[in-house]
Image (cartoon, rainbow, N blue to C red):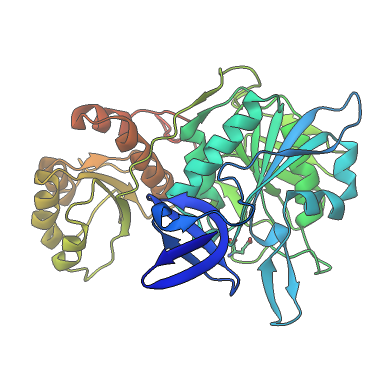
Amino acid sequence: MSCEYGGKTHKGIYITSRNDMAVVKLSSGYNIGVPPSSCTCIEQTVPSTPRSRVVNNTPGLPDLSIVSTGGTIASRIDYRTGSVTSQFDASDILVAIPELAQIANYRTLPLAAILSENMTPAIWQELARAVHAEIRDGATGVIVTHGTDTMAYSAAALSFMIDTPVPIVFVGSQRSADRPSSDNAMNAVCAAAAATSDLGEVAVVMHATTSDDTCAIHRGTRVRKMHTSRRNAFQSVGIPPIGSVAFPSRTVTLTPDAVKRGTHTLALHDNLEPHCALLQFYPGMTPDLLRAYEGYKGLVLAGTGLGHVSTLLIPAIKKLIEAGTIVVMTSQCMHGRVCDRVYDTGRDLLNTGVIEGGDMLPEAALVKLMWVLGNVKDKKNAAEMMQADLKGELNRRSAHGL
Ligand code: GLU
């Protein structure tokens, strides 16, 4: 592709389109965004919605799709720089972990090769469309390989964007394949087992213990990365895990609460309103900070305890709400639910129109707010949806001890 832009000719390969701009990879390795009208096609282009291809086809095995997005599970050491880079795609993962071929047939789709701190709502939308297309075209389960840092956000995003009759399993690894303690192979095998199980919802499957004996199956809207480097970093929050996979037997056990295969009919709801934010309160936060959120459609606050921020911030929050921003209160506490009716700060917040977020994780609440505001324009309906349990993200009552 050759693009005339900014008085220069840029030659490269068309990658995708974002915000009405064509993203072109130059031979230097850099990407540029240019208006599509400035470009002419001079060589083969990469389609913006790539389709999966079949990698193995053994009669009698279930048909899974692996959609790769990057992260440590798809990475190895770059001996030039000494750092870990995300280089593998879904097909490489199959070659690197031959045991996967005993479990299923696979189609593979390399959607992205990014570290997950670079994930965006626009890529969640591409991912949701790709996963939906795989299921529509016959996949009986989908594995999404993903960096662990923001995997919980993406799992929550797909939970809201897809009604799925089959398992959609996110998996990653904390340690890259070249390290003796890598968790990539066991996690991938557990994910494939979960993807062929009776599960019918979006889940995260990762090491459950420090040993190589069990993976936990976590609901996509109730999971968090709790440790920077341990292999058992992921934990369910507010509910127990919805299942487990024993290793090496690959025996999957689902709890009665897990949504079962076939419960839902496949549907895609891929609208998102990305102009939403998540803000963690801290003592000493000043109201001027909230000015940065003027014009935002939604704001999730991670308040203290039962859902509080300093009284000094309340007029600024009121101003945001009066200008049309939906503000949802969650808690920095890992467990429990917000209740803004106990202390006067909380009552003042409710009086300004802040919505209580129940026991939703702040990050799940952010993704939900993007999804709700992408689909519902009426503010009252949006507020009601934020207080309803849509995909297991909000418990009506907190279970004892959780
Ligand atoms: N920060 C990177 C990511 O989340 C690497 C961490 C990982 O994959 O575990 O993609």
Q: Residue at x 67, y 53 (%)?
A: 172
Please tell me which residue lies in front, 184 or 250. 184
Q: Quadrant of the N terminus?
A: bottom right
Q: Residue at x 52, y 51 (%)?
A: 16
Q: Is residue 397 above or below residue 1?
A: above
- The x, y position of residue 230, in whole percent, is 67, 63
Q: Residue at x 42, y 65 (%)?
A: 4
- The x, y position of residue 353, in whole percent, is 15, 40
- The x, y position of residue 75, in whole percent, is 71, 64
Please tell me which residue lies in front, 374 or 252. 374
Judged from the image, the quadrant occupied by ligand 1 is bottom right
Please tell me which residue lies in front, 214 or 182. 182
- The x, y position of residue 134, in whole percent, is 65, 31
Please tell me which residue lies in front, 400 or 327. 327
Q: Is residue 65 above or below residue 308?
A: above
Image quarter of residue 375: top left
Work out whether residue 392 can be spotted.
Answer: no
Q: Residue at x 51, y 35 (%)?
A: 159
Q: How many labels, in total? A: 0
